[in-house]
Image (tube, rainbow, N blue to C red):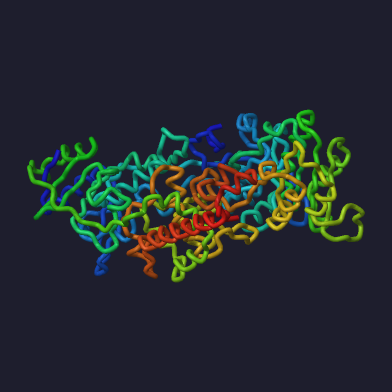
Amino acid sequence: MTTIAQAGRKSTEPLRPEPATVLEVIQETPNIRTLRLAFDDPSVMEAFSFLPGQIGQLSVLGAGESTFAISSAPSGSGSFEFSIMKAGVVTGAIHELAAGDRTAVRAPMGCGFPTDEWKGKNIVLVAGGIGMAPLRSLLFHLLDNRGDYGELTLVYGARTPADLCYEAGRADWQQRSGLDFTATIDAACEGWDGCVGLVPNVLEERGPSPENSVAVTCGPPIMIRFTLQSLSKMGFREEQIYTTLERRMKCGIGICGRCNLGPKYVCTDGPVFSLQELRELPEEL
Amino acid sequence: MTKIIKNDNIARLLEQLAEDAEVWAPRELAGTGTAIFERWQNGVAVDLEHITSISAKDVVLPRTEKLFDFNYAFGDPVPGENIEIVAAVTAPATVLFGARACDAKALTVLDALFDNPESESYNDPNYQARRRALTVITLACTTADAACFCSSFGEGPAGKAGSDLILYPLEGGYLAEAVTARGESILDAATRFFEESNAEPPQLAETATVEGLDGLQQQLPAIFKDLDFWNEITATCISCGFCSHGCPTCYCFNIHDEMSGDRKGERLRSWDACMFYVYTQEASGHNPRPTQAHRYRNRINHKFSYYPVNQGETLCTGCGRCIRGCPTNLDIREVLRAAKARAVETELMADGGKAETDK
């Protein structure tokens, strides 16, 4: 698969995407859709693999391309998914795609979560809004390899019930043994009898132990900021906390220059960073 | 190997070179006292007196270039039935004539990033094709203007890095010295324009140097958070981006699609500049570098700290184009001196604070 850039691998034409087809479109929320895709070339699809946390570039030829986290299970065969919030020109065009439409994809890119290093540990996932997308891929991986990890905790919040993604997944996660899953919304509303409260507060209420644990958080910057405070209060050290960063990206291969944090590039050295790594980089988030 | 070419033979040499290659050379923008590099055509006078306002980098990294063609997919009755992505790299033999040492040196800096099979870095097929088809004929500088400082970060006014052949101005002509086999082959193939010579190279230009910048790479982080400093420095900056576009080593780019007629389009890569607001603006509206201070801070850090960390070289050849072209007279040399002074001051204060605490 020489046309696709991958961290640590050279590519002869890393800016050239691979044709892919939309297999399914799932309307997650009023402004978030999940696209299930497959590369058109069966051998490319066959060879495609990625780590949870890795990213890809999805093109609507004519409109352009944008970077998204791959949100599906790494072990899923034959297809992969991006969950996309409508926000601009490219995402607007993506939201007009239907099953059968053709696109082009460059993936995977960047570094995923170090799930091998985490074997034997408890994992705490803290997600807000569209920030659930990369953590969903991670959660699938953890559930598919359940025996390798200890207790799993997931706190996933959104403003309203309608803003929560992955309805089928959430129903499944509620049933899973060894997974403490809480979906929460910001303020009480009719028809919602689940948890109400801001993500960091709910996280503190669930109170997962920092002992032999790692915490992973992704969401709006304000949520991340308060989640980090909560984690710190709960006793999590910086090296136990991971996040996946969002930046505007174009090339995805550490050249075009807009996603750097000091000498590191989010598209190739990230998007996954431990808080400890981030503390060593210039603060420019 | 050195030979002499007389002034009258320059145009004839270019004519011969143009038979087999695209020739790029500086042309004076009439009455402006400045020049630009462009495709040379028969009969056009070459300006070997004025330094060009914009560097020669677009010979290898064009302002806009095609990455590939595609047959349009979106919105077809049978959407994307004929989707097809066609790479489009072709590079004719090209001669860059009249580059300055700062331009030639910059090519070697860009090579480290775009054409470096030895490293794990990215190898760009478009850049590689153009670069490998390129012959560089450099004009050594016997004069310098107030903005030149190639002796600080570049190779100096007659540096050989990146050149195939160097021309030293003499009375009535130029002394030609081959640097590479490619340069020699030009001397060999165009014998009728070159004469054997034992002439000595002329006195070269003296360019200003920015002294005392050792350790800047390590010191810049000390003032990263000092937004007061960066605000002061960029008080007049209007984010026009000329410093990036004129620069021979700035390589940041954008990627975008353009449709051309029914169902056909192309994906293009264009020069971009870290001084533009939208460069880092995210779809959410959040911008990690919202002000000139943030953006210029990144520009200076990239050139003098981040790039040296990653590639071992400073991303500046002292050509002075960002100084000559800045509409608000921002002088990178003054910025570096000020940054150095501020960093030293900051470090002293930090040490002082530490000493206080230790008591």
- Considering the image in quadrants, where does the N terminus of chain B appear? top left
Where residue B29 sits: x, y (%)? 27, 65
**Farthest front residue in view:** B359
Residue placed at 84% from the left, 38% from the top?
A179
Indicate left or right for A6 with B191 as reference.
right
Where residue A104 sits: x, y (%)? 60, 43
- Considering the image in quadrants, where does the C terminus of chain B appear? bottom right
Task: Give above or below for B290 relative to B59.
Answer: below
Pick the front one: A131 or A153: A153
Indicate left or right for B224 with A192 as reference.
left
Residue placed at 12% from the left, 40% from the top?
B191
Pick the front one: A69 or A241: A241
Pick the front one: B279 or B345: B345
Residue placed at 62% from the left, 46% from the top?
A58
Q: Can residue A238 be seen in the rendering of this structure?
A: yes
Where residue B313 sits: x, y (%)? 39, 45
Residue placed at 88% from the left, 60% from the top?
A188
Q: Can residue A100 be seen in the rendering of this structure?
A: no
Where residue B201 sits: x, y (%)? 13, 48
Indicate left or right for A245 with B252 as reference.
right
Task: Give above or below for B249 relative to A120.
Answer: below
Pick the front one: B227 or B194: B227
Q: How many marks?
A: 0
